[in-house]
Image (cartoon, rainbow, N blue to C red):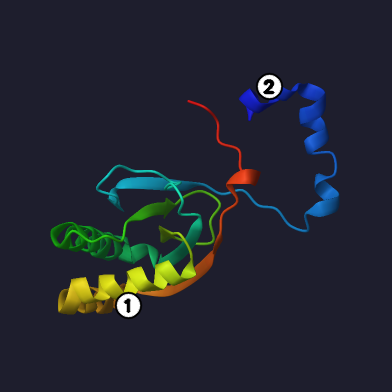
Amino acid sequence: MASLMEKVGEDKFSNLFEDFDKNYNTHSDFILLLDKELSYMPDGITMTPEGENYRENTRYYYAPQDYDKALGVAKAFNKLYSEKKSKTHYRVYRSGFGTDGPYFLVAVSAKGPMEMEQNRMENQKLLGEEGRKLYNDLQGVILRAETVRGWIRPDLSYVASK
């Protein structure tokens, strides 16, 4: 945010947050850590694949004592996707400070909901019985899963230049 403040000036930057309290009922801060080793993006890691602004983000919650089991399943998924050369790419984030419990967040991108579903069906067919078994293993490790689907808004986003 420092580079944004430098570009627009301190006054304009302050004005951006002037009505913050009037527009937000709740606010929290938390940290997610991108795990490049658990992610499956053979063409290179990017959080914003070109033209793929639809997201399916699933949090897989696990008990703290089951971290090693959850990590093992995540590694097994990565290995299976790699071996089968899956066209469905995903990013994995680990929960950090400020989250409501330990979880892995899996983010999948597509052009829209229809493409997301088509990709899911093709991927299930590709992964076959190995994929079904691994998914059952996942169900035996997690406490619950929560999925959020929707569109990102690049026109409303700020990405700091490197």
Residue at disc 2, secondary structure: helix
Viewer-proximal residue among 30 and 132: 132
Q: 124 left or right of 84?
A: right
Please give the residue where the numbered disc 1 appears in the rendered image: 139
User: Measuring 31% from the left and 61% from the top, which residue is drawn there?
Assistant: 88
**Residue in view at x 56 percent, y 54 percent:** 152
Q: How many marks?
A: 2
Q: Can you tell which of label 1 and label 2 is closer to the viewer? A: 2
Up/down of 102 relative to 122, above or below: above
Q: Which mark is residue 7?
A: 2
Name the residue located 40 percent from the left edge and 46 percent from the top edge: 34
Which residue is painted at 16% across and 74% down in the image? 130
**Which element is circle 1 on?**
helix
Crowding near pointer 1: few (<14 within 10 Å), some, many (20+)?
some
Q: Quadrant of residue 121?
A: bottom left
Gap in Å between the C-alphas at discs 1 and 2?
A: 48 Å
Q: Where does the image place residue 146, in percent across and percent down from the top left?
A: 49, 71
10 Å neighbourhood of mark 2: few (<14), some, or many (≥20)? few
Q: Amino acid at mark 1?
A: Gln
